């Protein structure tokens, strides 16, 4: 039986967004240990605040402070915290209706075990030691048996309010490529590129997926393609990626390898970015020990005729 390939894979990027007046006040308030909600025209106080009434869709901006104490409305026990979650030990996810609010806020509750958590229990905010203007400024909630907190009547006006946030998005998982892509990866270690031919339409797919996306039938016939190919379309990258040691601007292109009926994507090098063009003939450049081409460079051949690759755009 062939080796089943597996590898950890991380997809990660920083999500940058600007803040409107309501979210700016809410997050700035957390930095200052103030919890703000927004009041609707019919008198409800929504926490966390939103910019539009979910019932009437009208814009709402009447900010009102609520207490840092509240009541658990529902909960679920998290017995195995994951990377990036609020607490490193088992805890409860809880919906907490803060005193003075009409909706509930989702956060973590630090409790010794599930037997210590119940709907209706009283809790209070535990503030983070260092606060930057994020939901993590609330470190978690903790059990509380004292009097209800008294909000200070803050209006939501702050000095140096936040105008934007950067929220990292990350997905960790284990990738297993399957039979077809495993053969493709093994071939790359020998500096070869293989695809699979559909037994019905006879198209050759690179990288192979084990089935023809057009005909819906299994593919097993391996076909070696390339190594040369044609640039079918491309884009110029002007923003430097984190942890990628490539100077901008550079070109990322779709390349139809000779003998393939599907274009794959790769970086183009060995030519100024503003000289890359559709129809450019290219070949792979390998670095020592690499499992895939580092980039593709011009071959010096005449450009391919548009009719030879127009179906692969």
Image (cartoon, rainbow, N blue to C red):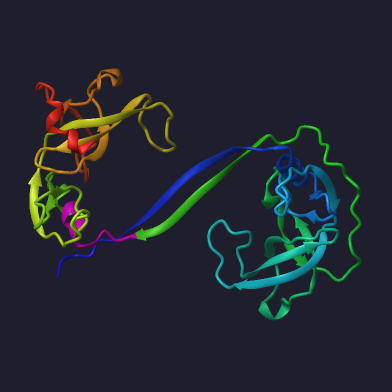
Relative image position of residue 37 (x, y in whole percent):
79, 50
Residue drawn where x is 17% and y is 26% of the image: 279
Where is 32 relative to 313, above or below? Answer: below
Range shown magenta: 175-185
Closer to the camera in the image, 238 or 114? 238
Q: Is residue 100 left or right of residue 131?
A: right
Magenta span contains residue 176:
yes
Closer to the camera in the image, 195 or 40? 40
Where is 189 relative to 309, above or below? Answer: below
Relative image position of residue 64 (x, y in whole percent):
85, 48
> In terms of image quadrants, where is residue 19?
top right
Residue drawn where x is 38% and y is 36% of the image: 244
Task: Please tell me how many numbered marks the rendered image carries.
Answer: 0
Q: Is residue 300 left or right of residue 23?
A: left
Residue drawn where x is 82% and y is 56% of the image: 44
Q: Quadrant of the C terminus?
A: top left
Magenta span contains residue 256:
no
Closer to the camera in the image, 277 or 226? 277
Tell me which secondary structure the magenta stretch mostly adopts. helix
């Amino acid at each position: 039986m062939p080796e089943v390939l597996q590898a950890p894979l991380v997809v990660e990027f920083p999500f940058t967004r600007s803040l409107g007046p309501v979210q700016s006040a809410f997050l700035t308030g957390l930095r200052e240990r103030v919890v703000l909600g927004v009041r609707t025209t019919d008198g409800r106080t929504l926490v966390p605040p939103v910019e539009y009434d979910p019932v009437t869709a009208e814009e709402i901006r009447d900010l009102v402070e609520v207490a840092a104490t509240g009541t658990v409305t529902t909960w679920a026990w998290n017995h195995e915290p994951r990377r990036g979650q609020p607490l490193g030990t088992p805890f409860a996810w809880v919906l907490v209706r803060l005193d003075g609010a009409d909706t509930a806020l989702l956060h973590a509750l630090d409790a010794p075990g599930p037997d210590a958590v119940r709907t209706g229990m009283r809790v209070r905010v535990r503030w983070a030691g260092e606060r930057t203007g994020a939901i993590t400024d609330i470190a978690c909630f903790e059990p509380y048996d004292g009097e209800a907190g008294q909000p200070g009547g803050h209006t939501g006006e702050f000095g140096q309010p936040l105008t934007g946030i950067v929220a990292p998005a990350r997905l960790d998982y284990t990738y297993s490529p399957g039979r077809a892509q495993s053969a493709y990866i093994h071939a790359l270690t020998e500096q070869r590129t293989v695809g699979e031919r559909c037994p019905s339409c006879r198209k050759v797919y690179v990288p192979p997926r084990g089935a023809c996306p057009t005909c819906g039938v299994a593919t097993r016939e391996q076909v070696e393609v390339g190594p040369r190919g044609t640039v079918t379309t491309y884009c110029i990258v002007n923003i430097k990626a984190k942890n990628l040691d490539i100077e901008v601007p550079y070109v990322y292109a779709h390349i139809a390898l000779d003998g393939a009926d599907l274009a794959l994507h790769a970086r183009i090098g060995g030519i100024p970015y503003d000289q890359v063009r559709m129809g450019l003939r290219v070949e792979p450049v390998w670095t020592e020990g690499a499992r895939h081409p580092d980039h593709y460079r011009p071959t010096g051949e005449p450009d391919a005729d548009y009719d030879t690759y127009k179906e692969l755009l």
